[in-house]
Image (spheres, helix red, strand yellow):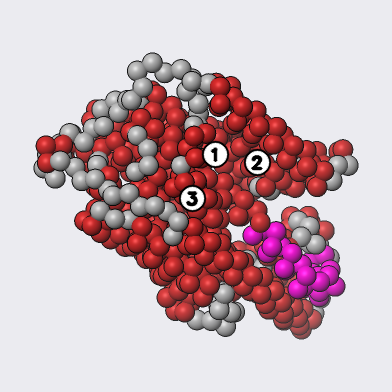
């Protein structure tokens, strides 16, 4: 423990750690605005999924392993390694010459991101007594809210051509922007942060780490864009997607079984299986899975709702989440202060889950005719509920174990939350696709689609018309603008009378509006099912939170926290 450090030293360390975490959180939101330009530049639409999945795989694998390593080799060393890898990965990602290089360096970025994430929350436990951790966990939680707001704005600005001093920005700047912040964070941590080390003679469980990596990587690949990532394999072998997933499930079960066996035998396991005999840890890990799925489900599909219903651009739809982000930040910070003051966390966690469950259920009342004000009010309460409950999970799990296990315990809960998000996105995506497909029926007969099919090049660029994702993409503002401009240019060049050209443009606009109405109606109906399901998932987390046996949070002694 390093509770004895001066308040000034603690503030400097936490500022640098939060800056590092901000890089990771920002990257997750800023990259989404650049994906379109990236695949367009590299002409690699089929590899789009890999740009995201490569990062997700390495982050998921690294988080629990980095948590254990930080207990063994020291928090300072691990977070310095994480910042270095992430910054170098950002540099090389921005310098990528083709899509394969970008995928490789995104995977490298993910390793750094996993190390930073695993250690940022754990360092709070090293620097502060249990009762003090609330305010800092709340501040760290607010970092994600700030990044969610700034990311789309900054990404949209950098992706477009702008002059910045003597440079001209493009999508590569969404990676280059990480470099100066990474260098500054590294320097501050290297100078001011103590070793924060707990193990004197580390013995690395390489076999356990390898088996865990295989299990987690296969799990991510089995649920995240599996059909797109393995499209070439499925096409060349004739294998069905179901068969592939069954094979991957067998690999996951075998690797997990071997991992459990190894962890029983080794002296220093990556994940102590005895943790699962701790009732609170088991409950918190389960809650983390449900919260991860519910949180991402509400945020991700609200963004799509804003794009489809309100016709917002990706940047604007991100801005429209500001009420949720504001609620999350205020509640996270305020709850952290209250927990530190009263020394209790369970009542706030329970209330947060109640608030978020009810608010997410109200999202199902949104319709295509709803005013944005209605959505904004609901979003404030969704964000406030999540902001109250989520940071407290780290406080709860850290109060269950000795200091020497802090990294392993904290990163394990983060792993389960990440897995919940990954599985949740896959399940909700399938629900959305099935709902839209069922509601729309065969869209090949739609007049708008038939008009688009008259241009083979357009159809090839847009993708499979029978795919619900393609139908949604066609209806986004940016794509609609490109289609309209392309049609207008083509029809204007045709050797037709002016009246015929005008009439054709009017008919096309009418077809586009009718198509929009169909898509928005089907999308909104499917989204209602997702929001109801998400609310039910959050309600399960609420029920589980009542089972937690609260432990008193100890306050720091005056001599341990000078200046506090």
Residue occupied by mark 3: 283
In contact (CB < 8 Å): disc 2 and disc 1: yes
> What is the magenta range?
428-453
Q: Residues within 10 Å of mark 3 (few under 14, many from 20)?
A: some
Quadrant of the rendered image containing residue 50: top right
Q: What residue appears at the point 59 percent right and 44 percent down from the top-left corner? A: 52
Q: Are marks 2 and 3 in contact (CB under 8 Å)?
A: no
- Label 2 or label 3, whichever lies nearer to me, is 3
Please give left or right for residue 563 compared with residue 323 in the image. Answer: left
Membership of 430 in magenta stretch: yes
98 up-or-down from 375: above or below:
above
Q: CA distance from mark 3 to mark 1?
A: 21 Å
Foreground label between 3 and 1 = 3
- Looking at the image, residue 536 sits to the left or right of residue 331; the answer is right
| Residue drawn at (45%, 74%) of the image | 378
Q: Secondary structure at mark 1?
A: helix
Could you say which is closer to the camera, residue 179 or residue 14? 14
Q: Is residue 31 visible?
A: no
Could you tell me residue 154's position as x and y percent?
43, 53
| Prevalent SS, magenta region | helix
Q: CA distance from mark 2 to mark 3?
A: 22 Å
Indicate the secondary structure of the residue bearing disc 3: helix
Q: Locate the C terminus by quadrant.
A: top left
The residue located at (23%, 57%) in the rendering is 342
In percent of width and height, residue 139 lies at: 31, 51
Residue named by callout 1: 60
Q: Is residue 98 left or right of residue 160?
A: right
Q: Which residue is mark 2?
A: 219
Residue 437, image x, y percentages:
76, 67
Q: Residue at x 52, y 45 (%)?
A: 416
């Amino acid at each position: 423990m390093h509770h004895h450090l001066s308040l000034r030293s603690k503030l400097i360390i936490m500022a640098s750690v939060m800056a590092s975490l901000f890089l990771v959180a920002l990257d997750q939101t800023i990259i989404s605005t650049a994906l379109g330009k990236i695949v367009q530049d590299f002409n690699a639409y089929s590899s789009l999924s890999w740009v995201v999945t490569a990062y997700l795989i390495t982050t998921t694998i690294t988080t629990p392993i980095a948590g254990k390593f930080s207990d063994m080799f020291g928090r300072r060393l691990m977070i310095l390694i994480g910042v270095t890898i992430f910054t170098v990965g950002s540099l090389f990602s921005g310098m990528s010459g083709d899509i394969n290089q970008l995928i490789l360096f995104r995977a490298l970025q993910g390793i750094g991101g996993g190390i930073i994430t695993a250690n940022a929350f754990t360092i709070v436990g090293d620097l502060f007594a249990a009762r003090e951790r609330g305010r800092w966990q709340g501040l760290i939680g607010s970092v994600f809210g700030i990044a969610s707001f700034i990311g789309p704005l900054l990404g949209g600005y950098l992706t477009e051509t702008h002059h910045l001093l003597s440079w001209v920005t493009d999508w590569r700047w969404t990676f280059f922007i990480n470099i100066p912040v990474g260098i500054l964070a590294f320097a501050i941590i290297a100078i001011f942060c103590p070793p924060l080390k707990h193990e004197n003679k580390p013995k690395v469980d390489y076999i356990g780490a390898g088996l865990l990596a295989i299990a987690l990587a296969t799990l991510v690949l089995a649920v995240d864009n599996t059909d797109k990532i393995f499209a070439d394999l499925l096409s060349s072998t004739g294998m069905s997607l179901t068969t592939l997933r069954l094979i991957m499930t067998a690999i996951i079960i075998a690797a997990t079984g071997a991992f459990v066996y190894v962890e029983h035998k080794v002296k220093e396991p990556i994940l102590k299986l005895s943790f699962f005999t701790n009732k609170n840890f088991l409950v918190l890990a389960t809650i983390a899975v449900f919260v991860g799925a519910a949180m991402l489900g509400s945020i991700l599909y609200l963004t799509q709702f804003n794009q489809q219903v309100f016709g917002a651009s990706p940047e604007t739809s991100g801005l429209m989440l500001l009420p949720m982000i504001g609620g999350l930040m205020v509640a996270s910070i305020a709850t952290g202060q209250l927990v530190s003051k009263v020394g209790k966390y369970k009542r706030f966690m329970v209330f947060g889950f109640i608030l978020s469950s009810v608010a997410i259920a109200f999202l199902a009342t949104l319709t295509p005719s709803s005013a944005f004000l209605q959505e904004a009010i609901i979003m404030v309460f969704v964000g406030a509920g999540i902001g109250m409950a989520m940071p407290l999970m780290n406080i709860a799990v850290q109060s269950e174990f000795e200091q020497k296990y802090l990294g392993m315990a904290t990163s394990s809960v983060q792993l389960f939350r990440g897995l919940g998000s990954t599985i949740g996105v896959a399940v909700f995506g399938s629900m959305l696709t099935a709902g839209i497909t069922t509601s729309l029926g065969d869209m090949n007969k739609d007049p708008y689609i038939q008009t688009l099919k008259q241009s083979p090049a357009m159809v090839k660029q847009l993708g499979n018309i029978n795919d619900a994702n393609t139908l949604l993409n066609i209806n986004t503002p940016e794509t609609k603008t490109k289609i309209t401009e392309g049609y207008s240019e083509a029809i204007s060049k045709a050797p037709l009378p002016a009246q015929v050209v005008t009439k054709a443009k009017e008919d096309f606009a009418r077809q586009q509006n009718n198509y929009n109405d169909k898509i928005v109606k089907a999308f909104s109906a499917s989204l209602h099912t997702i929001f109801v399901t998400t609310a039910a998932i959050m309600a399960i987390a609420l029920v589980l939170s009542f089972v937690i046996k609260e432990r008193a949070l100890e306050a720091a002694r005056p001599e341990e926290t000078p200046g506090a």
